[in-house]
Image (spheres, rainbow, N blue to C red):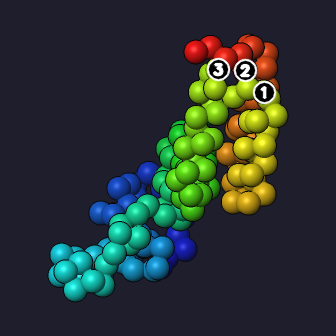
């Protein structure tokens, strides 16, 4: 794999820089084929997006002058290995009127940071907790 920084000219990576695209187990795009799937050499985990791939997309977005999109890709990269039930529980808390208190959101942020290393996502939730408090969004609305 090349250490050359990614740029807008490298997008889409699968076409322009296929050597940088890898599965979590290190398989390349050339390793993924119908034959490999039928022979059980490729599984569902090999088809999932990786944190590395999302960070690469962030690098391209930043090079294109899209820092907000880059930050979203980076937060997504942090969530790749977070269990689905944790993501859904956190998502539910973030819906206005669902969390009963600021402490609930702060606890979710702490879990994401301390257990899963998702510090950018945790900071985003902590910011949301402050906004929800200012806007009185902790009240049960339904």
Q: Give the labeled residue for mark 2.
A: 138
Horizontal and vertical percent position of residue 28: 37, 78
Q: Is residue 134 left or right of residue 12?
A: right
Check residue 97 in the rendering and tell me which mark sits there, or answer none: 3
Check residue 34 in the rendering and tell me which mark sits there, or answer none: none
Horizontal and vertical percent position of residue 95: 59, 27
Within 10 angstroms of label 3, few (less than 14), some, or many (20 or more) residues? some
Within 10 angstroms of label 1, few (less than 14), some, or many (20 or more) residues? some
**Callout 1: helix, strand or loop?**
loop
Give above or below for 95 relative to 74.
above
Tell me the residue at 46%/79% (across/down). Answer: 25
Q: Nearer the viewer, residue 35 or 2?
A: 35
Q: Is label 2 in contact with label 3 (beta carbons under 8 Å)?
A: yes
Tell me the residue at 35%/56% (across/down). Answer: 12
Horizontal and vertical percent position of residue 118: 69, 54
Check residue 101 in the rendering and tell me which mark sits there, or answer none: 1
Q: Is label 1 in contact with label 2 (beta carbons under 8 Å)?
A: yes
Q: Is residue 46 left or right of residue 126?
A: left
Asked if residue 138 shows in the view, the reply is: yes
């Amino acid at each position: 794999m090349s250490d050359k920084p990614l740029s807008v000219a490298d997008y889409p990576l699968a076409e322009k820089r296929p050597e940088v695209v890898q599965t979590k187990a290190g398989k390349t795009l050339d390793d993924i084929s119908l034959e490999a799937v039928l022979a059980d050499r490729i599984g569902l985990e090999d088809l999932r997006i990786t944190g590395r791939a999302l960070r690469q997309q962030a690098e391209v977005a930043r090079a294109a002058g899209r820092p907000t999109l880059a930050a979203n890709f980076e937060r997504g990269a942090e969530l790749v290995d977070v269990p689905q039930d944790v993501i859904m529980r956190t998502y539910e808390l973030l819906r206005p009127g669902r969390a009963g208190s600021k402490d609930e959101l702060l606890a979710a942020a702490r879990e994401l940071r301390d257990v899963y290393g998702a510090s950018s996502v945790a900071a985003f939730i902590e910011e949301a907790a402050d906004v929800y408090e200012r806007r009185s969004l902790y009240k049960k609305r339904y």
